[in-house]
Amino acid sequence: MVLEATMICIDNSEWMRNGDYSPSRFQAQADAVNLICGAKTQSNPENTVGVLIMAGKGVRVLVTPTSDLGKILACMHGLEVGGEMNLAAGIQVAQLALKHRQNKKQQQRIIVFAGSPVKHEKKMLEMIGRKLKKNSVALDIVNFGEDDEEKTEKLESLLAAVNNNDTSHIVHVPAGPNALSDVLISTPIFTGDGEGGSGFAAAAAAAAAGGVSGYDFGVDPNLDPELALALRVSMEEERARQEAAAKKAAEDTSKQGGEQQAGSQEASSQDATMTERASASTSEAENKTTDLMDDENALLQQALAMSMDEPAVGHDVKDTDMSEASVDDPELALALQLSVADSTKDQASQSEVLADQSAVSDILASLPGVDLNDPSIKDLLASMQNKSEPQKKNDDKSSNEEKK
Amino acid sequence: MSGESATTAIHKGQVDLLDFIDWTSVECLNQSTTHSLPNAIKQGYREDEGLHLESDADEQLLLYIPFTQVIKLYSIAFKGPEDEGPKTVKLFSNKEHMGFSNVNDYPPSDTVVLSPEHLQVGKPVLLKYVKFQNVRSLTIFIEDNQTGSEITKVQKIQLIGSTVETTDMKGLKKIEDH
């Protein structure tokens, strides 16, 4: 919770085009900068962070120390890579920017990303380091990218000149599978000398690890134990309810036609998936929904099988549907049937409905621009008729009953 | 008060301004972490021979001492080793948050050059009183030391003056004694 004003010096030289850090050195650096800004502003709301670039046309301050995270992230956008890094000038400009900070009570800190080779003399860097120490400015160095003996030596000597009571640090990040940000999270640069930022660092590590966090619902039990408990309890309740509902559905489908049950089952499953998603769970929820989908599919398969194999049963269902609606108009009955069987997977009933030849031709006639005598339309109707031949008798029967 | 007059010879009406220092905002740039400012100005610490203020990266020191009320500064006394004690000292009145880079931007309110004799006994140096009539904070810039060594050491710093609002009651008594 140290009150701090930080200036981040970014290396946007040509060396940053290299892809040995995925996706590119520059992008890895940008991600790390974003994380650092977030950590700093979170550890103390009065902390300010500023950004400057060391390469390009020259050293340039992108944003002066501010606590507005949005401003910082915005200035990172659209940065171009090019030119050569000027480490000495960068540090000096950073020091100047910190000197003119608004809140003089803030401690001064500079974070340098040194990716390209260092062309300054060791003596000069030591002098700069001493000047920083004299003005009680702490310095953190991230040594990544280009790696040679000289560079490491120079940076180490710079750190030795600046370091006052272990407030300054250097981190060497070699190229590899780990992202730059991930490596930095565990360093004192993030954790702020062992206090403060560790909570944020833990959460960031969880997010970065991408689901392999150990937290069931993406909520740290340490940060918010009540919320985590509530989520767990509601998840268990939902699971129990799902199982009970599935059991009941399985029993019911064996008794009646599967359609309505499947429809209602699906609706309740959708509700369940909604609540689960709302609780922001991770892969667990996804597994759950796929299980539910499988259950639904199984039930629907049952329904389809039944309606295909046992026209009598399907017939009864349809009759109950119709009597419930209590209408005489065959087209309206058709529309009702369509709305009942509105599931996209429930194609069987739809095809049955469409196969009702007379109703379809009536509908088509009412459509503007469709001529029933058109050969293509006739062919279409004929093919549909052939497809649903076994169902045709059934449909005619029901429609005849309605007409009465 | 009378006990002090033997070595420090406080002018009548003037007091040690130790009590009026605002300790929460006292700052010192380029001080060594082990040998810090309180060693030189705090009561008890400054009398201790073993405790002193030391510079860190180079021989310069920048001290910022704010006061709890407005004071008039009469004289200043330094005590330290003859070889590493301060020599040229610049004083700035009412300038906040100065850095080493802008010490040369402003003319100092007064400049004091110390000799080894001053350092040995902590002899107070009279200042341009007119320049220190209305002091809220004092910045002391120790520019170099007696021998030009890397580190400057200061044993004790004493500020002598009077307050503006009220005259110190102790000081009044002293006059009456005479």
Image (cartoon, helix red, strand yellow):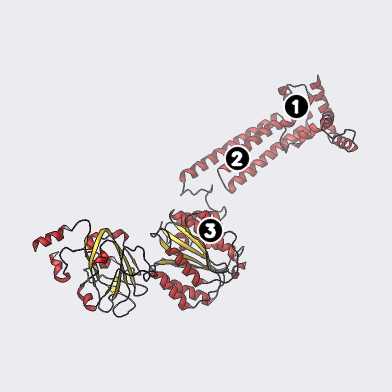
The x, y position of residue A88, in whole percent, is: 49, 72
Give the label, 1 or 2, closer to the camera.
2
Q: Are marks 1 and 2 in contact (CB under 8 Å)?
A: no
Check disc 3 and report the residue beneath it.
A34
Q: Nearer the viewer, residue B41 or A315?
A: B41
Which residue is the site of mark 1? Answer: A318
Q: Please report contact status of discs 3 and 1: CB closer than 8 Å, yes or no.
A: no
Q: Indicate left or right for A129 with B140 as reference.
A: right
Residue depicted at x 46% and y 77%: A124
Residue A125, x across and y down, in percent: 46, 75
Identify the amino acid type marked 3: Asn
Query: Looking at this rendering, what residue extends furthest in the front direction?
Result: B130
- Mark 3 vs mark 1, CA separation in Å: 61 Å
Q: Which quadrant of the structure image shows residue A25?
A: bottom right
Asked which secondary structure carries label 1, the reply is: helix
Residue situated in front as seen by the camera: A141 or A355: A141
Under mark 2, the amino acid is Met
Mark 2 or mark 3: name the one nearer the start of the chain. Answer: 3
Is residue A386 left or right of A283 when viewed as pictured? right
Q: Is residue A384 left or right of residue A148?
A: right
Question: Residue at label 2?
Answer: A274
**Mark 1 Cα within 10 Å, few/some/many (few <14, many 20+)?**
some
Disc 1 marks which amino acid? Lys
Residue A18, quarter of picture: bottom right
